[in-house]
Image: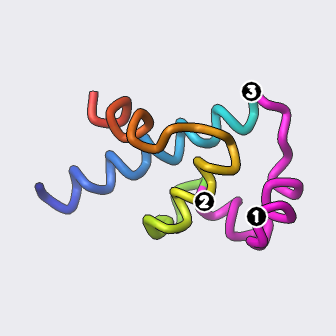
Amino acid sequence: MKKRQAQEISDKIISILREERLKKGITQYKMAKDTGMSKSSILYIENCTQHPTLYTALLLADYLKLDFAEIVQEALK
């Protein structure tokens, strides 16, 4: 896999997480507070300015009660 492909998949995963956060009516501030992250980290991740670690992506998916494997499969389509 090339770096560009990995970035595109990461961006899709983040897009899915953001869409789910918005569907559930959760603010960036609440998500940050509940996960122990900073609001600016959530903002940078959702704007694809900063790519999350696997740990962070798993943490956010778990917080949103999403199956990370399904998110990855969706991003690979």
For residue 35, the mark is 1
Amino acid, disc 2: Leu
Q: Which residues are magenta?
A: 24-45
Picture coordinates of residue 5, whole percent (x, y): 21, 50
* Element type where label 2 sits in the image: helix
How far apart are labels 1 and 2 at the CA level?
Answer: 7 Å
Kindly report which numbered mark, 1 or 3, lies closer to the viewer in this rendering.
Answer: 1
Q: CB atoms at circles 1 and 2 under 8 Å apart?
A: yes
For residue 45, the mark is none
- Say which residue label 2 marks: 59
Horizontal arrangement in the rendering, residue 4 relative to residue 1 (left or right)? right
- Say which residue label 3 marks: 23
Q: What residue is at 53 percent from the left and 36 percent from the top?
A: 16
Amino acid, disc 1: Thr
Picture coordinates of residue 60, whole percent (x, y): 62, 54
Q: What residue is at 37 percent from the left and 29 percent from the top?
A: 74
Q: Quick one: label 1 or label 2, which is nearer the N terminus?
A: 1
